[in-house]
Image (cartoon, rainbow, N blue to C red):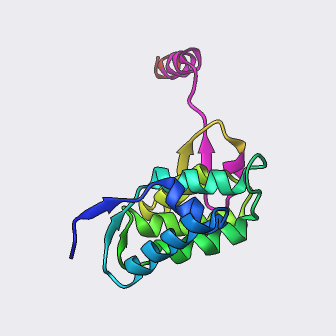
């Protein structure tokens, strides 16, 4: 087996969009090698997030969420492609296909599921629509001081 190589965003994009036939064919060959464990590839959550962003962007490809989920999931399960937090990424893609949240928010929710967390500090109201998730906002220093003062006066 060969050394490990990092897989960048544009490799996923050239394969998934088929917008340059020569590059598509080269990327297809690379992914086929990964499927057969002939190469060792690795990528990151950041790359996956960028692929989702570009594929869904109105400025670029405008692909529907379910199509992005299916296409990327097929690649992420290739045995020759290592993805840290692979299951988190796959779950995030599933959430992304079903909910109107940014992919990065879906990644956060997926990490929360894995960690058995139900509360998230965020100003993003999109989390309010997710079953089992409780969004909380940090309090201002004045609010904390007022609560402490009220607690102190109750003790007195």
Residue 62 quadrant: bottom right
Residue 124 quadrant: top right
Marks counted in the figure total 0
- Considering the image in quadrants, where does the N terminus appear? bottom left
- The answer to whether any part of residue 55 appears in the image is yes
- The answer to whether any part of residue 118 appears in the image is no
Q: Which residues are magenta?
A: 126-151
Residue 116 screen position, x and y as percent: 45, 62
Please give the name of the residue rendered at 59% of the width and 20% of the height, measured from the top-left corner: 143
Residue 60 screen position, x and y as percent: 73, 50
Residue 145 screen position, x and y as percent: 52, 16
Asked whether 137 falls inside the magenta stretch, the response is yes
Asked whether 16 falls inside the magenta stretch, the response is no
Left or right, 4 with respect to 132, comes to: left
Left or right, 148 with respect to 98, comes to: left
Please give the name of the residue rendered at 65% of the width and 67% of the height, measured from the top-left corner: 18
Tell which residue pokes out farthest to the bottom in this image.
Answer: 36
Please give the name of the residue rendered at 50% of the width and 23% of the height, measured from the top-left corner: 151
């Amino acid at each position: 087996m060969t050394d490990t190589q990092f897989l960048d965003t544009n490799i996923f994009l050239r394969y998934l969009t088929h917008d340059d036939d020569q590059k598509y064919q080269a990327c297809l060959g690379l992914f086929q090698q990964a499927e057969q464990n002939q190469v060792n590839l690795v990528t990151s959550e950041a790359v996956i997030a960028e692929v989702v962003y570009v594929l869904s962007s109105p400025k670029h490809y405008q692909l529907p969420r379910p199509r992005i989920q299916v296409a990327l999931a097929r690649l992420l399960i290739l045995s020759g492609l290592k993805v840290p937090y692979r299951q988190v990424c796959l779950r995030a893609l599933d959430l992304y296909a079903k909910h109107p949240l940014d992919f990065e928010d879906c990644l956060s929710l997926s990490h929360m599921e894995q960690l058995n967390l139900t509360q998230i500090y965020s100003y993003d109201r999109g989390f309010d629509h997710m079953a089992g998730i409780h969004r909380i906002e940090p309090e201002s220093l004045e609010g904390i001081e007022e609560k402490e003062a009220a607690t102190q006066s109750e003790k007195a």
